[in-house]
Image: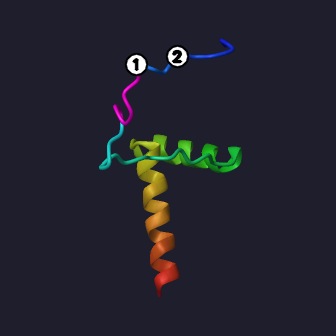
Amino acid sequence: MKKEYDFSKGIRGRFYNPDGEFNLPIYLEPEIAEFVQKLAEEKNVDRSQIVNRLLEKDKEIIEL
């Protein structure tokens, strides 16, 4: 890295997007990730669909 950088020609807020959405990654423990992977392969669906379905069911149980 340089000791100093010249930002004199920079434009403040150039990449700011007030409507931007962030999808933060969720890291599963290896045992759970393996379970989800196997289940997704058996059902022939994407892993994220399996995780979303599991979370939806947990949400339903919690809301009872």
2 on left or right of 9: right
* Secondary structure under the numbered disc 1 in the rendered image: loop
Q: Amino acid at mark 1?
A: Lys
Q: Position of residue 31 (x, y in %)?
A: 70, 48
Q: Identify which residue, 12 or 42, lies in the foreground.
A: 12
Would you place residue 4 above or below residue 63 in this image?
above
Would you place residue 50 above or below residue 55 in this image?
above
Magenta span covers which residues?
A: 9-15
Q: Are marks 2 and 1 in contact (CB under 8 Å)?
A: yes
Residue 50 located within the stretch drawn in magenta: no
Say which quarter of the image contains residue 5.
Answer: top right
Q: Identify which residue, 60 or 24, lies in the foreground.
A: 24
Residue highlighted by disc 2: 6
**Residue at 45 percent of width and 20 percent of height:** 8
Q: Amino acid at mark 2?
A: Asp
Residue highlighted by disc 1: 9
Give the distance between the C-alpha atoms of the residues marked 2 and 1, in whole angstroms.
8 Å
